[in-house]
Structures are given as structure tokens and as C-alpha cells.
Image (cartoon, coloured by chain):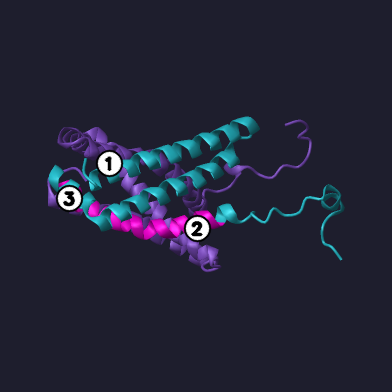
Amino acid sequence: MSMRTPLSLVRGHGSAKSGAHHWWAQRLSAIALAPLFLWFVASFLVVAGGDYAAAVSWVRSPLNSALLVLLIGAMFYHAQLGMQVVFEDYISTHWLQVASIILVRFLAMLLAVVSISAVLSVAWGS
Amino acid sequence: MGNIDRPLSPHLQIYRPQLTAALSILHRASGVFLAIGSLQLVYWLNALAQGPDSYAQAQAIFGSPVGQLILLPWVLALFYHLCNGIRHLFWDMGLGFEITSVYASGKLVVVAAVVLTLITYGVAYSMQGGAV
């Protein structure tokens, strides 16, 4: 016997099977960000204390530029997922909520690409 | 909201302030603050990509009192969100739900965030005279 309510049977809409996707993506990006940020703060302390040449050679190291790109990607992905939940919880005007979520997604993508582009232009020299 | 002639559940101001509730909303607030403050990293990386002059300018801004006024809370928010995020991951695994554990881990997270921030700034200032 089905446990579905009569209303849901009539509507004929089953689960989209993606209900946990947002939750799962938020946890995975969080798990990635924990070590990435510990690495970033620890090495950034050394770098920011030095001069321009030291900063450039730090970014140029292949491992550092790879980790920086991963950090930027995971950070803006995680930020966008988090901001989405905040908007969903606190903005009750539907069109404004959707517009805010779309805006934050575009912004996160823009900032991530701008940052990664900066890392790569330093790493590969220009 | 229409007719409210019905029993309503007590709102926030009815409850006694609790550490758990404060840390919960602080996790969200620090997340929003971190997201906005990520612009600092975008700026720093682009300043570095632009060349020595813009990099020196960025370093001067981050080292200035106004720059520190933004960077210091950002570092604190980062460590808080990181530590409390790990606390959340333990909850996601079904661990640490007893009321004593929830309070103990909450206090631990606050202490860890402050200590990590102090260590970060201690190292930064001992390495040179200023900008993190």
C-alpha cells in the first residue's frame, strides 16, 4: 500500500530525486574547504609578509596555483550555496528571492573566474 | 498575513538567550560576512596580477587601520565558521547531540576560533610589522 497522500497521487508528481543534492554539495564543499583554508592561511602569512617577487614565486609554484584554483572554486561554490539558503529563508517575496539567487550565482561565477584568471596569469607569466 | 486569531508559538524575544541559538545564527552571519569579504581575496590576486605597483598599493590598504578593521573580523569569522562547520559535520554523522555535548562543543568552537585568530596575528606580526 502506498504511503503517498491522496493529493500527491492525484497531482502525479513524484520525488525529483534531487532533494538532498544541495545539502550534500554544501557538505562536500565544506569538507574540501577545511584543509584548503588551513593551508591558505598558513602559507599566506609567510607570503604576505614578503615582497612582490616572493608573492609571485609563491603563486607560480604549480602546487600552490593548483590549490589556489581549487580553493577559489570550492569557496565561491560553497558561498553561493549558503547565500541561496539565506535568501530562501528570509526573502518571502518570491520574485525577489529567485532574482537574488540568480544574481548571487552569476556573481559567484564571475568572481571565481576573475580570481582564477588572475592566478593563472601570474602562474604562467604575462 | 491575514487572520491571526489563533494560538501563536512564542517568538524569539520570548526565549531566554542561549549559547546554542547564538552560535547557530552566528554561523549563518559569519558565512554571509565571509562571502562578502571574499572580495578581498579577489582584489589581492588581481593586484598581484597587475604588477608591483598595484600589489604595493594593495598591501598598503590591507595594512592600513581601515584594512585591518575589515581583515581582522574576517579572519575571526573564517576560523569560527571553519570550527563550527566541523561541529556541524559531526552532527551530520549523528554525533554529539546530547545537550552537554552541544554546549561543550559550542564553547570549544568559540575558544578555538579566538585562539587560531590570535596565533595567526601573532605569527603575522612577528614575521613583519603589520599586514597579514
Q: Which residue is mark 3?
A: A57
Residue A2 forms part of the magenta stretch: no
Q: Which residues are magenta?
A: A24-49
Name the kind of residue labelled 3 in the image.
Ser
Of A40 and B99, the residue lying toward us: A40
Residue B120 at least partly seen: yes
What is the crowding at mark 2: few (fewer than 14 residues within 10 Å), some, or many (at least 20)?
some
Tell me the quadrant of the picture where the N terminus of chain A can be found.
bottom right
Q: Position of residue A47 (x, y in %)?
A: 19, 50
- How far separated are the C-alphas under marks 1 and 2? 27 Å
Quadrant of the image occupied by residue A92: top right
Residue at figure coordinates x 78%, y 39% from the top left: B6
Labels 2 and 3 share a subunit: yes
Q: Which chain is purple?
A: B
Q: Which chain is cyan?
A: A
Q: Which residue is mark 2?
A: A27
Residue at figure coordinates x 78%, y 50% from the top left: A13
- Asked if disc 1 and disc 3 are in contact, CB closer than 8 Å, the reply is no
Labels 1 and 3 share a subunit: no
Q: Chain of mark 1?
A: B
Quadrant of the image occupied by residue B70: top left
Tell me the quadrant of the picture where the C terminus of chain A can be found.
top left
Name the kind of residue labelled 1 in the image.
Leu
Label 1 SS: helix
Q: Nearer the viewer, mark 2 or mark 3?
A: 3
Q: Which residue is mark 1?
A: B45
What is the crowding at mark 3: few (fewer than 14 residues within 10 Å), some, or many (at least 20)?
some
Residue at figure coordinates x 29%, y 58% from the top left: A39
- How far separated are the C-alphas under marks 1 and 3? 13 Å
Label 3 SS: helix
Q: Position of residue A95 (x, y in %)?
A: 63, 31
Q: Chain of mark 3?
A: A
